[in-house]
Amino acid sequence: MKPLLYKITGVWGNHEGSMLLWVAILALFGGLVAAFGNNLPLSLRAHVLAVQAWVAGAFYLFILVTSNPFLRIASPPIEGRDLNPVLQDIGLAVHPPMLYLGYVGFSISFSFAIAALMEGRIDAAWARWVRPWTLVAWIFLTLGIAMGSYWAYYELGWGGWWFWDPVENASLMPWLAGTALLHSAVVMEKRNALKVWTILLSILTFSLSLLGTFLVRSGVITSVHAFATDPTRGVFILLILCLFIGGSLALFAGRATSLKQGGLFAPISREGALVLNNLLLTVACAVVLFGTLYPLAMEMLADFKMSVGAPFYNLTFAPLFALLLLAVPFGPMLAWKRGDLLGVTQRLLAAGVAGLVVVAIVWAWVRGGSALAPLAIGLGVFVIAGAVTDIVERTGLVRLPFASALHRARGLPRSAWGTAFAHAGLGVALIGIVCETTWNSEHIATMKQNDVAHVAGYDLKLDGLFQRQGPNYREMIAEFNVSRDGKSLTVMTPSKRSFTTRGSSTTEAALLTRGASQLYVSLGDATAEGAIAVRIYHKPLVLLIWWGPVLMAFGGVLSLSDRRLRVGAPKPARAKQRLQPAE
Amino acid sequence: MRRMMAAFVALLLLALPAAHAVQPDEIMSDPAKESRARELSRELRCMVCQNQSIDDSDAPLARDLRLLVRERIAAGDSNSQVLDFLVARYGDFVLLKPRFERQNLLLWMLGPVLLLGGGLALWLQIRRRSGSGADVPPPPLTADEKTRLAALMSDDSKPS
Amino acid sequence: MTLWFVFALMTVAAIFAVLWPLGRSSGAQDQGSEVAVYKDQLAEVERDLAAGLIPAPEAEAARVEISRRLLAAAASEPAMAPKSNLKWRRAAAVLALAGLPLVAVAVYMPLGSPKLQDFPLAQRERGSGMAQSLENLVVQVEQHLEKNPTDGRGWNVLAPVLERLGRFDDAVRAYRNSLTYNGESAERRSDLGEAMSAAAGGVVTAEAKAEFERAHALNADDPKANYFLGLAAEQDGRKDDAANIWHALLAKAPADAPWRVLVQSSLARVGGGGAMPALSDETIAATKDMAEGDRNAMVRGMVDRLATRLKQNGDDVEGWLRLVRAYLVMGERDKAMGASADARQAVASDAERLRQLNEGLKTLGVGG
């Protein structure tokens, strides 16, 4: 019997069920706005809910007409259809709801944008109202992407964690656009500037979510021909896509010109830095979008089959992000309107020196080799140190006596802490990515009993192979005794499960976590002579790749708890009375 | 024809047990050549899989391609010769990194062009606009504005 | 009845969700305003200034900007305040009361199927028709074997049934397991080989041939092994070898063996008709043609059955691949292409199956 958890998660293991989850989350967000949106003016709230209802209506219709989840199967299998063994995993239980909470959460910023366009009133207050909703969606999307990546890492058996697969790109694009939106909304809230752009970004972010749903759900990615053979669903989503993107862009075009210019600012300023951030994120997003759609377009228009894969994205995406990261520490330290680049540089000197020292140390330690990796690690350190510097500067930790610094730290808005954590998370993830890709060592061999493999200072001795009978599979387990410098550490037991009647097999990798690094063992096929193909990886600091996003999400939560975002809700009468004497 | 079909089917049946990405028996004895092979493998698509390089893929075809790559390397081909050979055989579809050619120009140039074009346009626009007032502090509040503001601020109990 | 009651309850809940806010007077509702936001922004500037986070001139400039926004917002607010309109509220209430149930019924009637009976597990296991019960029986045995894969007798029972159902690849697996847990026997080896050939669309593959050879080694008189070894020889183009094998088989065969006819017709096909001396050349030619025709008809029947089954239940990716393969072997490329299109359509809703299918089709050379 399948555990109860997988009976529930099995619901979104297929198309109809996942669309059901999609609309359920859409309804949930609408409900949340209705329940917690009492800091919004009534007319804005009404418009937001109306737009949200239109989106929901379109998707209810989609489900009813093309993918009814309650359809009766003519001859139902006795005990259900079973869930693919690879998907029977806690990661899959949590990953799709998280991702969908992110995807669909951006529908709220979309509804806000449309509502604002309909009312024709777009100003700084709007940016503050939309911020918590955007943040919630962004936090879930960040966690959802990270979780999916970790799931692929430990379940698929060769230790890859990001494949630039169209399905992954579909979730990355709204993330990039959503991150840009978060930043541009800050400018709008503070300076009443970038209004047109922020509204456009809200529309684009949700459009990319819809596009992602279309790409994944219509099967157009698997094969253009597969799409052509059963186009009903794809065409329906495409219609929804055109309706909402087209409609909102038309509304936008009609209203955008009538918007008044907001506050002015110099190129070197906080606003300028945020504009740069938006530029880089948008270009990165465009590159991913283009890379994902280009092969489809070429196949359909020119009948030319081509691929766009990881090497392309690494080459185009990495420089953009390097530039972005280089600018990240400067942003929060520049003043609004007109910043003093020289002054900020001076204040970031310590962070820069820290970065350079790390570059030198790493370079000396690995003794030459590619100069790129130490530089990238130095960049990561610079970003982290920059985030720390920002907090130190704001609290005056160095300039002021400790007590008053502590007082100021307490008075510091939570969103400032959130910014620091999120930016530091970027640096952490970068260090993890660079270490894993550069110094990942692997050992592929056929091993017999008592053979010893040496990987990155660890000795793995194959103690033996065992068979075991699981509830619905047979399992071959290899036992490895792991030791380092002659000291025995632990026993690792990777296994290979074969599901007898299904005739399929899954690989269960064994992971040994040491600090942030991991030893990764997975099994291949057994040979007739009792030997077995083994793949052992040592992945230095690999866990940082996921700690980074977790840190970023934590920053998001901090920012969300900032009291500013709750302002506007009328306080209960009694609280108001108690406050009055203080004035 | 039949014989060939049978061989094909046999291959299919043999391939059924899940193979694994790079197998121990594929590895070349020369580490330098092996690392070149791995590097190339990462840039080649396993054509029956969804967006996997042959370095990652379990499919039998990927294994054949990996062996082919190693064969060519052993025969003394340079990296680009190996790629040329595979493209001639399987088309551009096999390359995960599209070549820098006419039909892919748009794809490759999009990022840089957007970045430079967008950056330049933004810089010019911000400079032009900021020239007219970023440095000048906004005119202070007039007396009338001040009184209205004071009225608003003291009026905290207003049911808005 | 329960169903309608639940529906009614859900409708009432939905109507209530609309009517409840309408019933409340709008004046009492909480709502925010831009004024509140800007006031808070002003307070924030003061806080930052007091904490020394921003210098005084910057704070002053920000204060002026925000104050202007505050004044503008305060001026436009009364104009923006929504006025409650009794007529519209009544209309909304009527729409909710009447429209909601009407729309729900209008959507449900064509899409829903309220008259379908319950179909609980117990009833399902009893099954409705013969085909149903056979399939369910197979499912039950499969589930039993999933938990007790070492039950050799179970595999022995399951394998031929699977083969008859056209699930050749599963049958191959079942025969393999039967061999593992029941031990070697010539019969099981040749059964396995037969299933393999069937899976390959009637071609005795190298792998299947190896099984027949093993069976032959275990029992040189095993008729099935001998017949298929002959077939393998024929497919290899070694007609004389095939004829020899079949001659030997017929010589040893009991007179009432049901498969005598099959072997004789095969023999006629490869031109080893010497075993039937009384026939004229014409008759031999006729038999040959007829035999070929019969054989083709048999194969075609199998393929058609498979196609019909897949038309009813298109979930079986392996089945589709087998069908395409069979068409390819028979040289009917158009039908193969047609079948692959049908297959894509049948599994299009399931990304995983679609991926498997496309992978398989590409390996067969009809993908793309």
Image (spheres, coloured by chain):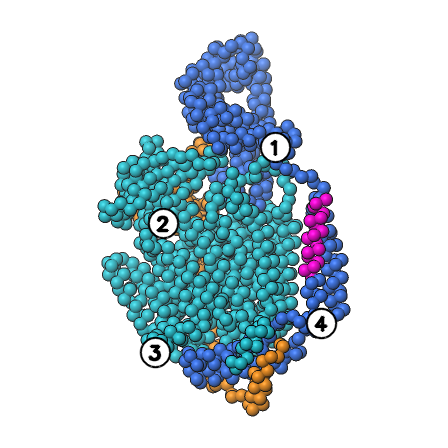
Q: Which x, y percent locates residue C274?
A: 50, 11
Image mark for residue B40:
2
Q: How many numbered discs?
A: 4
Residue C84's tag is 4
The kind of residue tagged 1 is: Glu
Query: Chain A, which colour?
Result: cyan
Q: Are marks 3 and 1 on the same chain?
A: no
Q: Which residue does the image show at 64% across and 67% down from the upper left?
A: A47
Percent x, y of residue C40: 53, 77
**Looking at the colours in the rendered structure, which chain would you say is drawn in orange?**
B
The residue wearing badge 3 is A400
Residue type at mark 2 is Leu
| Residue C4 inside the magenta-drawn segment | yes
Sequence-wise, the earlier of marks 1 and 4 is 4
Residue in the image at 57% along x and 84% along y = B154
- Mark 3 on the same chain as mark 4: no
Q: Is residue A191 magenta-colored?
A: no
Q: Which residue is mark 1?
A: C125
Dot 1: element = helix
Query: Which residue appears at 42% of the width and 38% of the height?
Result: A497
Q: Which chain is blue?
A: C
Chain of the residue that carries numbered disc 2 in the rendered image: B
Q: Chain of mark 1?
A: C
Report the mark closest to the observer, 1 or 2. Answer: 1
The mark lying in front, picked from 3 and 4, is 3
Q: What is the CA distance from the residue labelled 3 to the residue labelled 1?
A: 79 Å
Question: Do the dots labelled 1 and 2 sit on one chain?
Answer: no
Q: Label 3 crowding class (10 Å Cα cut-off): few <14, some 14-19, many 20+?
A: few
